[in-house]
Each structure stands twice: as structure tokens, then as C-alpha cells.
Image (cartoon, rainbow, N blue to C red):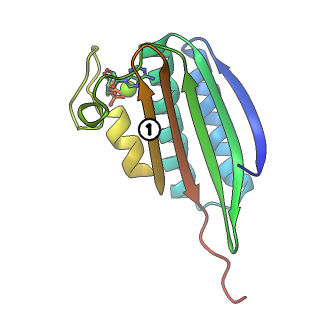
């Protein structure tokens, strides 16, 4: 992450809405198209919600990334909750250990360009996602 734009503590449900709004603002600011901004904001809200629902609390970092011609937004949701015993299962549509639909993680993955999840039982979970703006034309 080249620039950290925002650091949020995720401690209760209302923080999920804040996370969504901040992601939307940053996406707009960095020139993502409207549908990409919505996709990013939705993915961020799903990973933030998972922190609250499954880990109780954690944090979210939002930042700007650049790679040559492209600029993008990165989001990292981190917690020190129970962790996920089987990440492959957790990434499957319809898999939930709670009362959810089990669509949060697989949807988030589909909505962004890059998605990474690391989890260790008893240690916690970190989800990183990136969404790029279209490359500048010409150049
Ligand atoms: N931060 C986390 N800490 C611990 N377990 C998690 C975390 N995020 C996801 N999980 C596990 O992965 C499963 C799948 O997550 P996913 O977001 O896809 O579904 P859900 O949260 O159960 O339901 P939905 O998001 O559809 O409301 C969860 O049920 C939970 O077992
Ligand atoms: Mg979820």
C-alpha cells in the first residue's frame, strides 16, 4: 500500500456503514467508474461485516495503490478472532457457520480485481482486496 487513506476500528454494526462510505469516497476520488465504486464498496462492507459478525472486532485500512499506469484502491480487513478452519469451504457460495447466506466472501471476491484471504485458527483473519481504475489511455 503506497498511501493509507483511512484507518477504521470495526467494533459494531454501524462501523460497516462507515466502511462502505469511506470505500465509496476513496473509489470516487481515485477515478474508478461508478459501477466499480459500487462493487468496491459492497465488497468492503462484506469483509467489514464479517469482522463484526464472526470475530467481534477488528480494523479496516483503506489505501491507494499504483502500478505504473494504473491507480487503485486497496482494502485490508484484519481481526484477531477465531480464524477460519477451512478457507476453501468459506469461499464457497452458500457456506456459513452462522445465520448468514454464506455469500459474503465469494461475492466480495467476484466484485474486485484481486482478493487474498489469510486465516489461522486461534489467531485471526486478514482479507485484502484491490480494485483498479481503468488504465490511463494514450501515454
Ligand atoms: N473474519 C472472520 N473470522 C472468522 N470466520 C470468518 C470470518 N469471515 C468469514 N468467516 C467464516 O467464513 C464463513 C463464510 O463467510 P461469508 O461472509 O461468505 O458468509 P456469512 O458471513 O456466514 O454469511 P453472509 O456474508 O452471506 O451474511 C462464515 O460463515 C464464517 O464461518
Ligand atoms: Mg459474511
Per the image, the residue denoted by label 1 is 117
The residue at the point 68 percent across, 19 percent down is 9
Could you tell me residue 6's position as x and y percent? 75, 35
Counting the numbered discs, the total is: 1
Secondary structure type for disc 1? strand
Question: Please, which residue is most extreme toward the bottom here?
Answer: 138
Q: Is residue 139 above or below residue 6?
A: below
Q: Quadrant of residue 134?
A: bottom right
Left or right: 55 in relation to 86: right
Q: Is residue 40 above or below residue 121?
A: below
Mark 1 Cα within 10 Å, few/some/many (few <14, many 20+)? Answer: some
Quarter of the image that includes the C terminus: bottom right
**Which is more toward the observer, 85 or 114?**
85
Disc 1 CB within 8 Å of nearest ligand 1 atom: no
Q: Quadrant of residue 41?
A: top right
The residue at the point 65 percent across, 51 percent down is 27
Left or right: 86 in relation to 39: left
Q: Quadrant of residue 30?
A: bottom right
The residue at the point 28 percent across, 14 percent down is 98
Quadrant where ligand 1 appears: top left
The residue at the point 53 percent across, 27 percent down is 48
**Which is more toward the observer, 15 or 122?**
122
Amino acid at each position: 500500500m503506497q498511501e493509507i487513506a483511512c484507518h477504521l476500528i470495526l467494533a459494531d454494526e454501524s462501523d460497516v456503514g462507515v466502511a462502505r462510505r469511506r470505500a465509496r469516497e476513496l473509489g470516487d476520488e481515485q477515478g474508478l467508474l461508478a459501477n466499480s465504486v459500487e462493487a468496491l464498496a459492497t465488497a468492503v462492507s462484506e469483509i467489514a461485516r464479517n469482522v463484526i459478525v464472526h470475530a467481534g472486532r477488528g480494523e479496516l485500512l483503506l489505501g491507494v495503490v499504483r502500478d505504473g499506469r494504473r491507480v487503485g484502491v486497496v482494502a485490508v480487513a484484519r481481526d484477531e478472532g477465531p480464524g477460519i478452519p477451512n478457507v476453501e469451504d468459506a469461499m464457497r457460495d452458500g457456506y456459513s457457520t452462522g445465520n448468514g447466506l454464506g455469500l459474503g466472501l465469494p461475492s466480495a471476491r467476484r466484485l474486485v480485481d484481486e482478493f487474498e484471504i489469510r486465516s489461522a485458527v486461534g489467531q485471526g483473519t486478514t482479507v485484502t482486496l484491490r480494485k483498479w481504475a481503468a488504465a490511463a489511455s494514450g501515454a
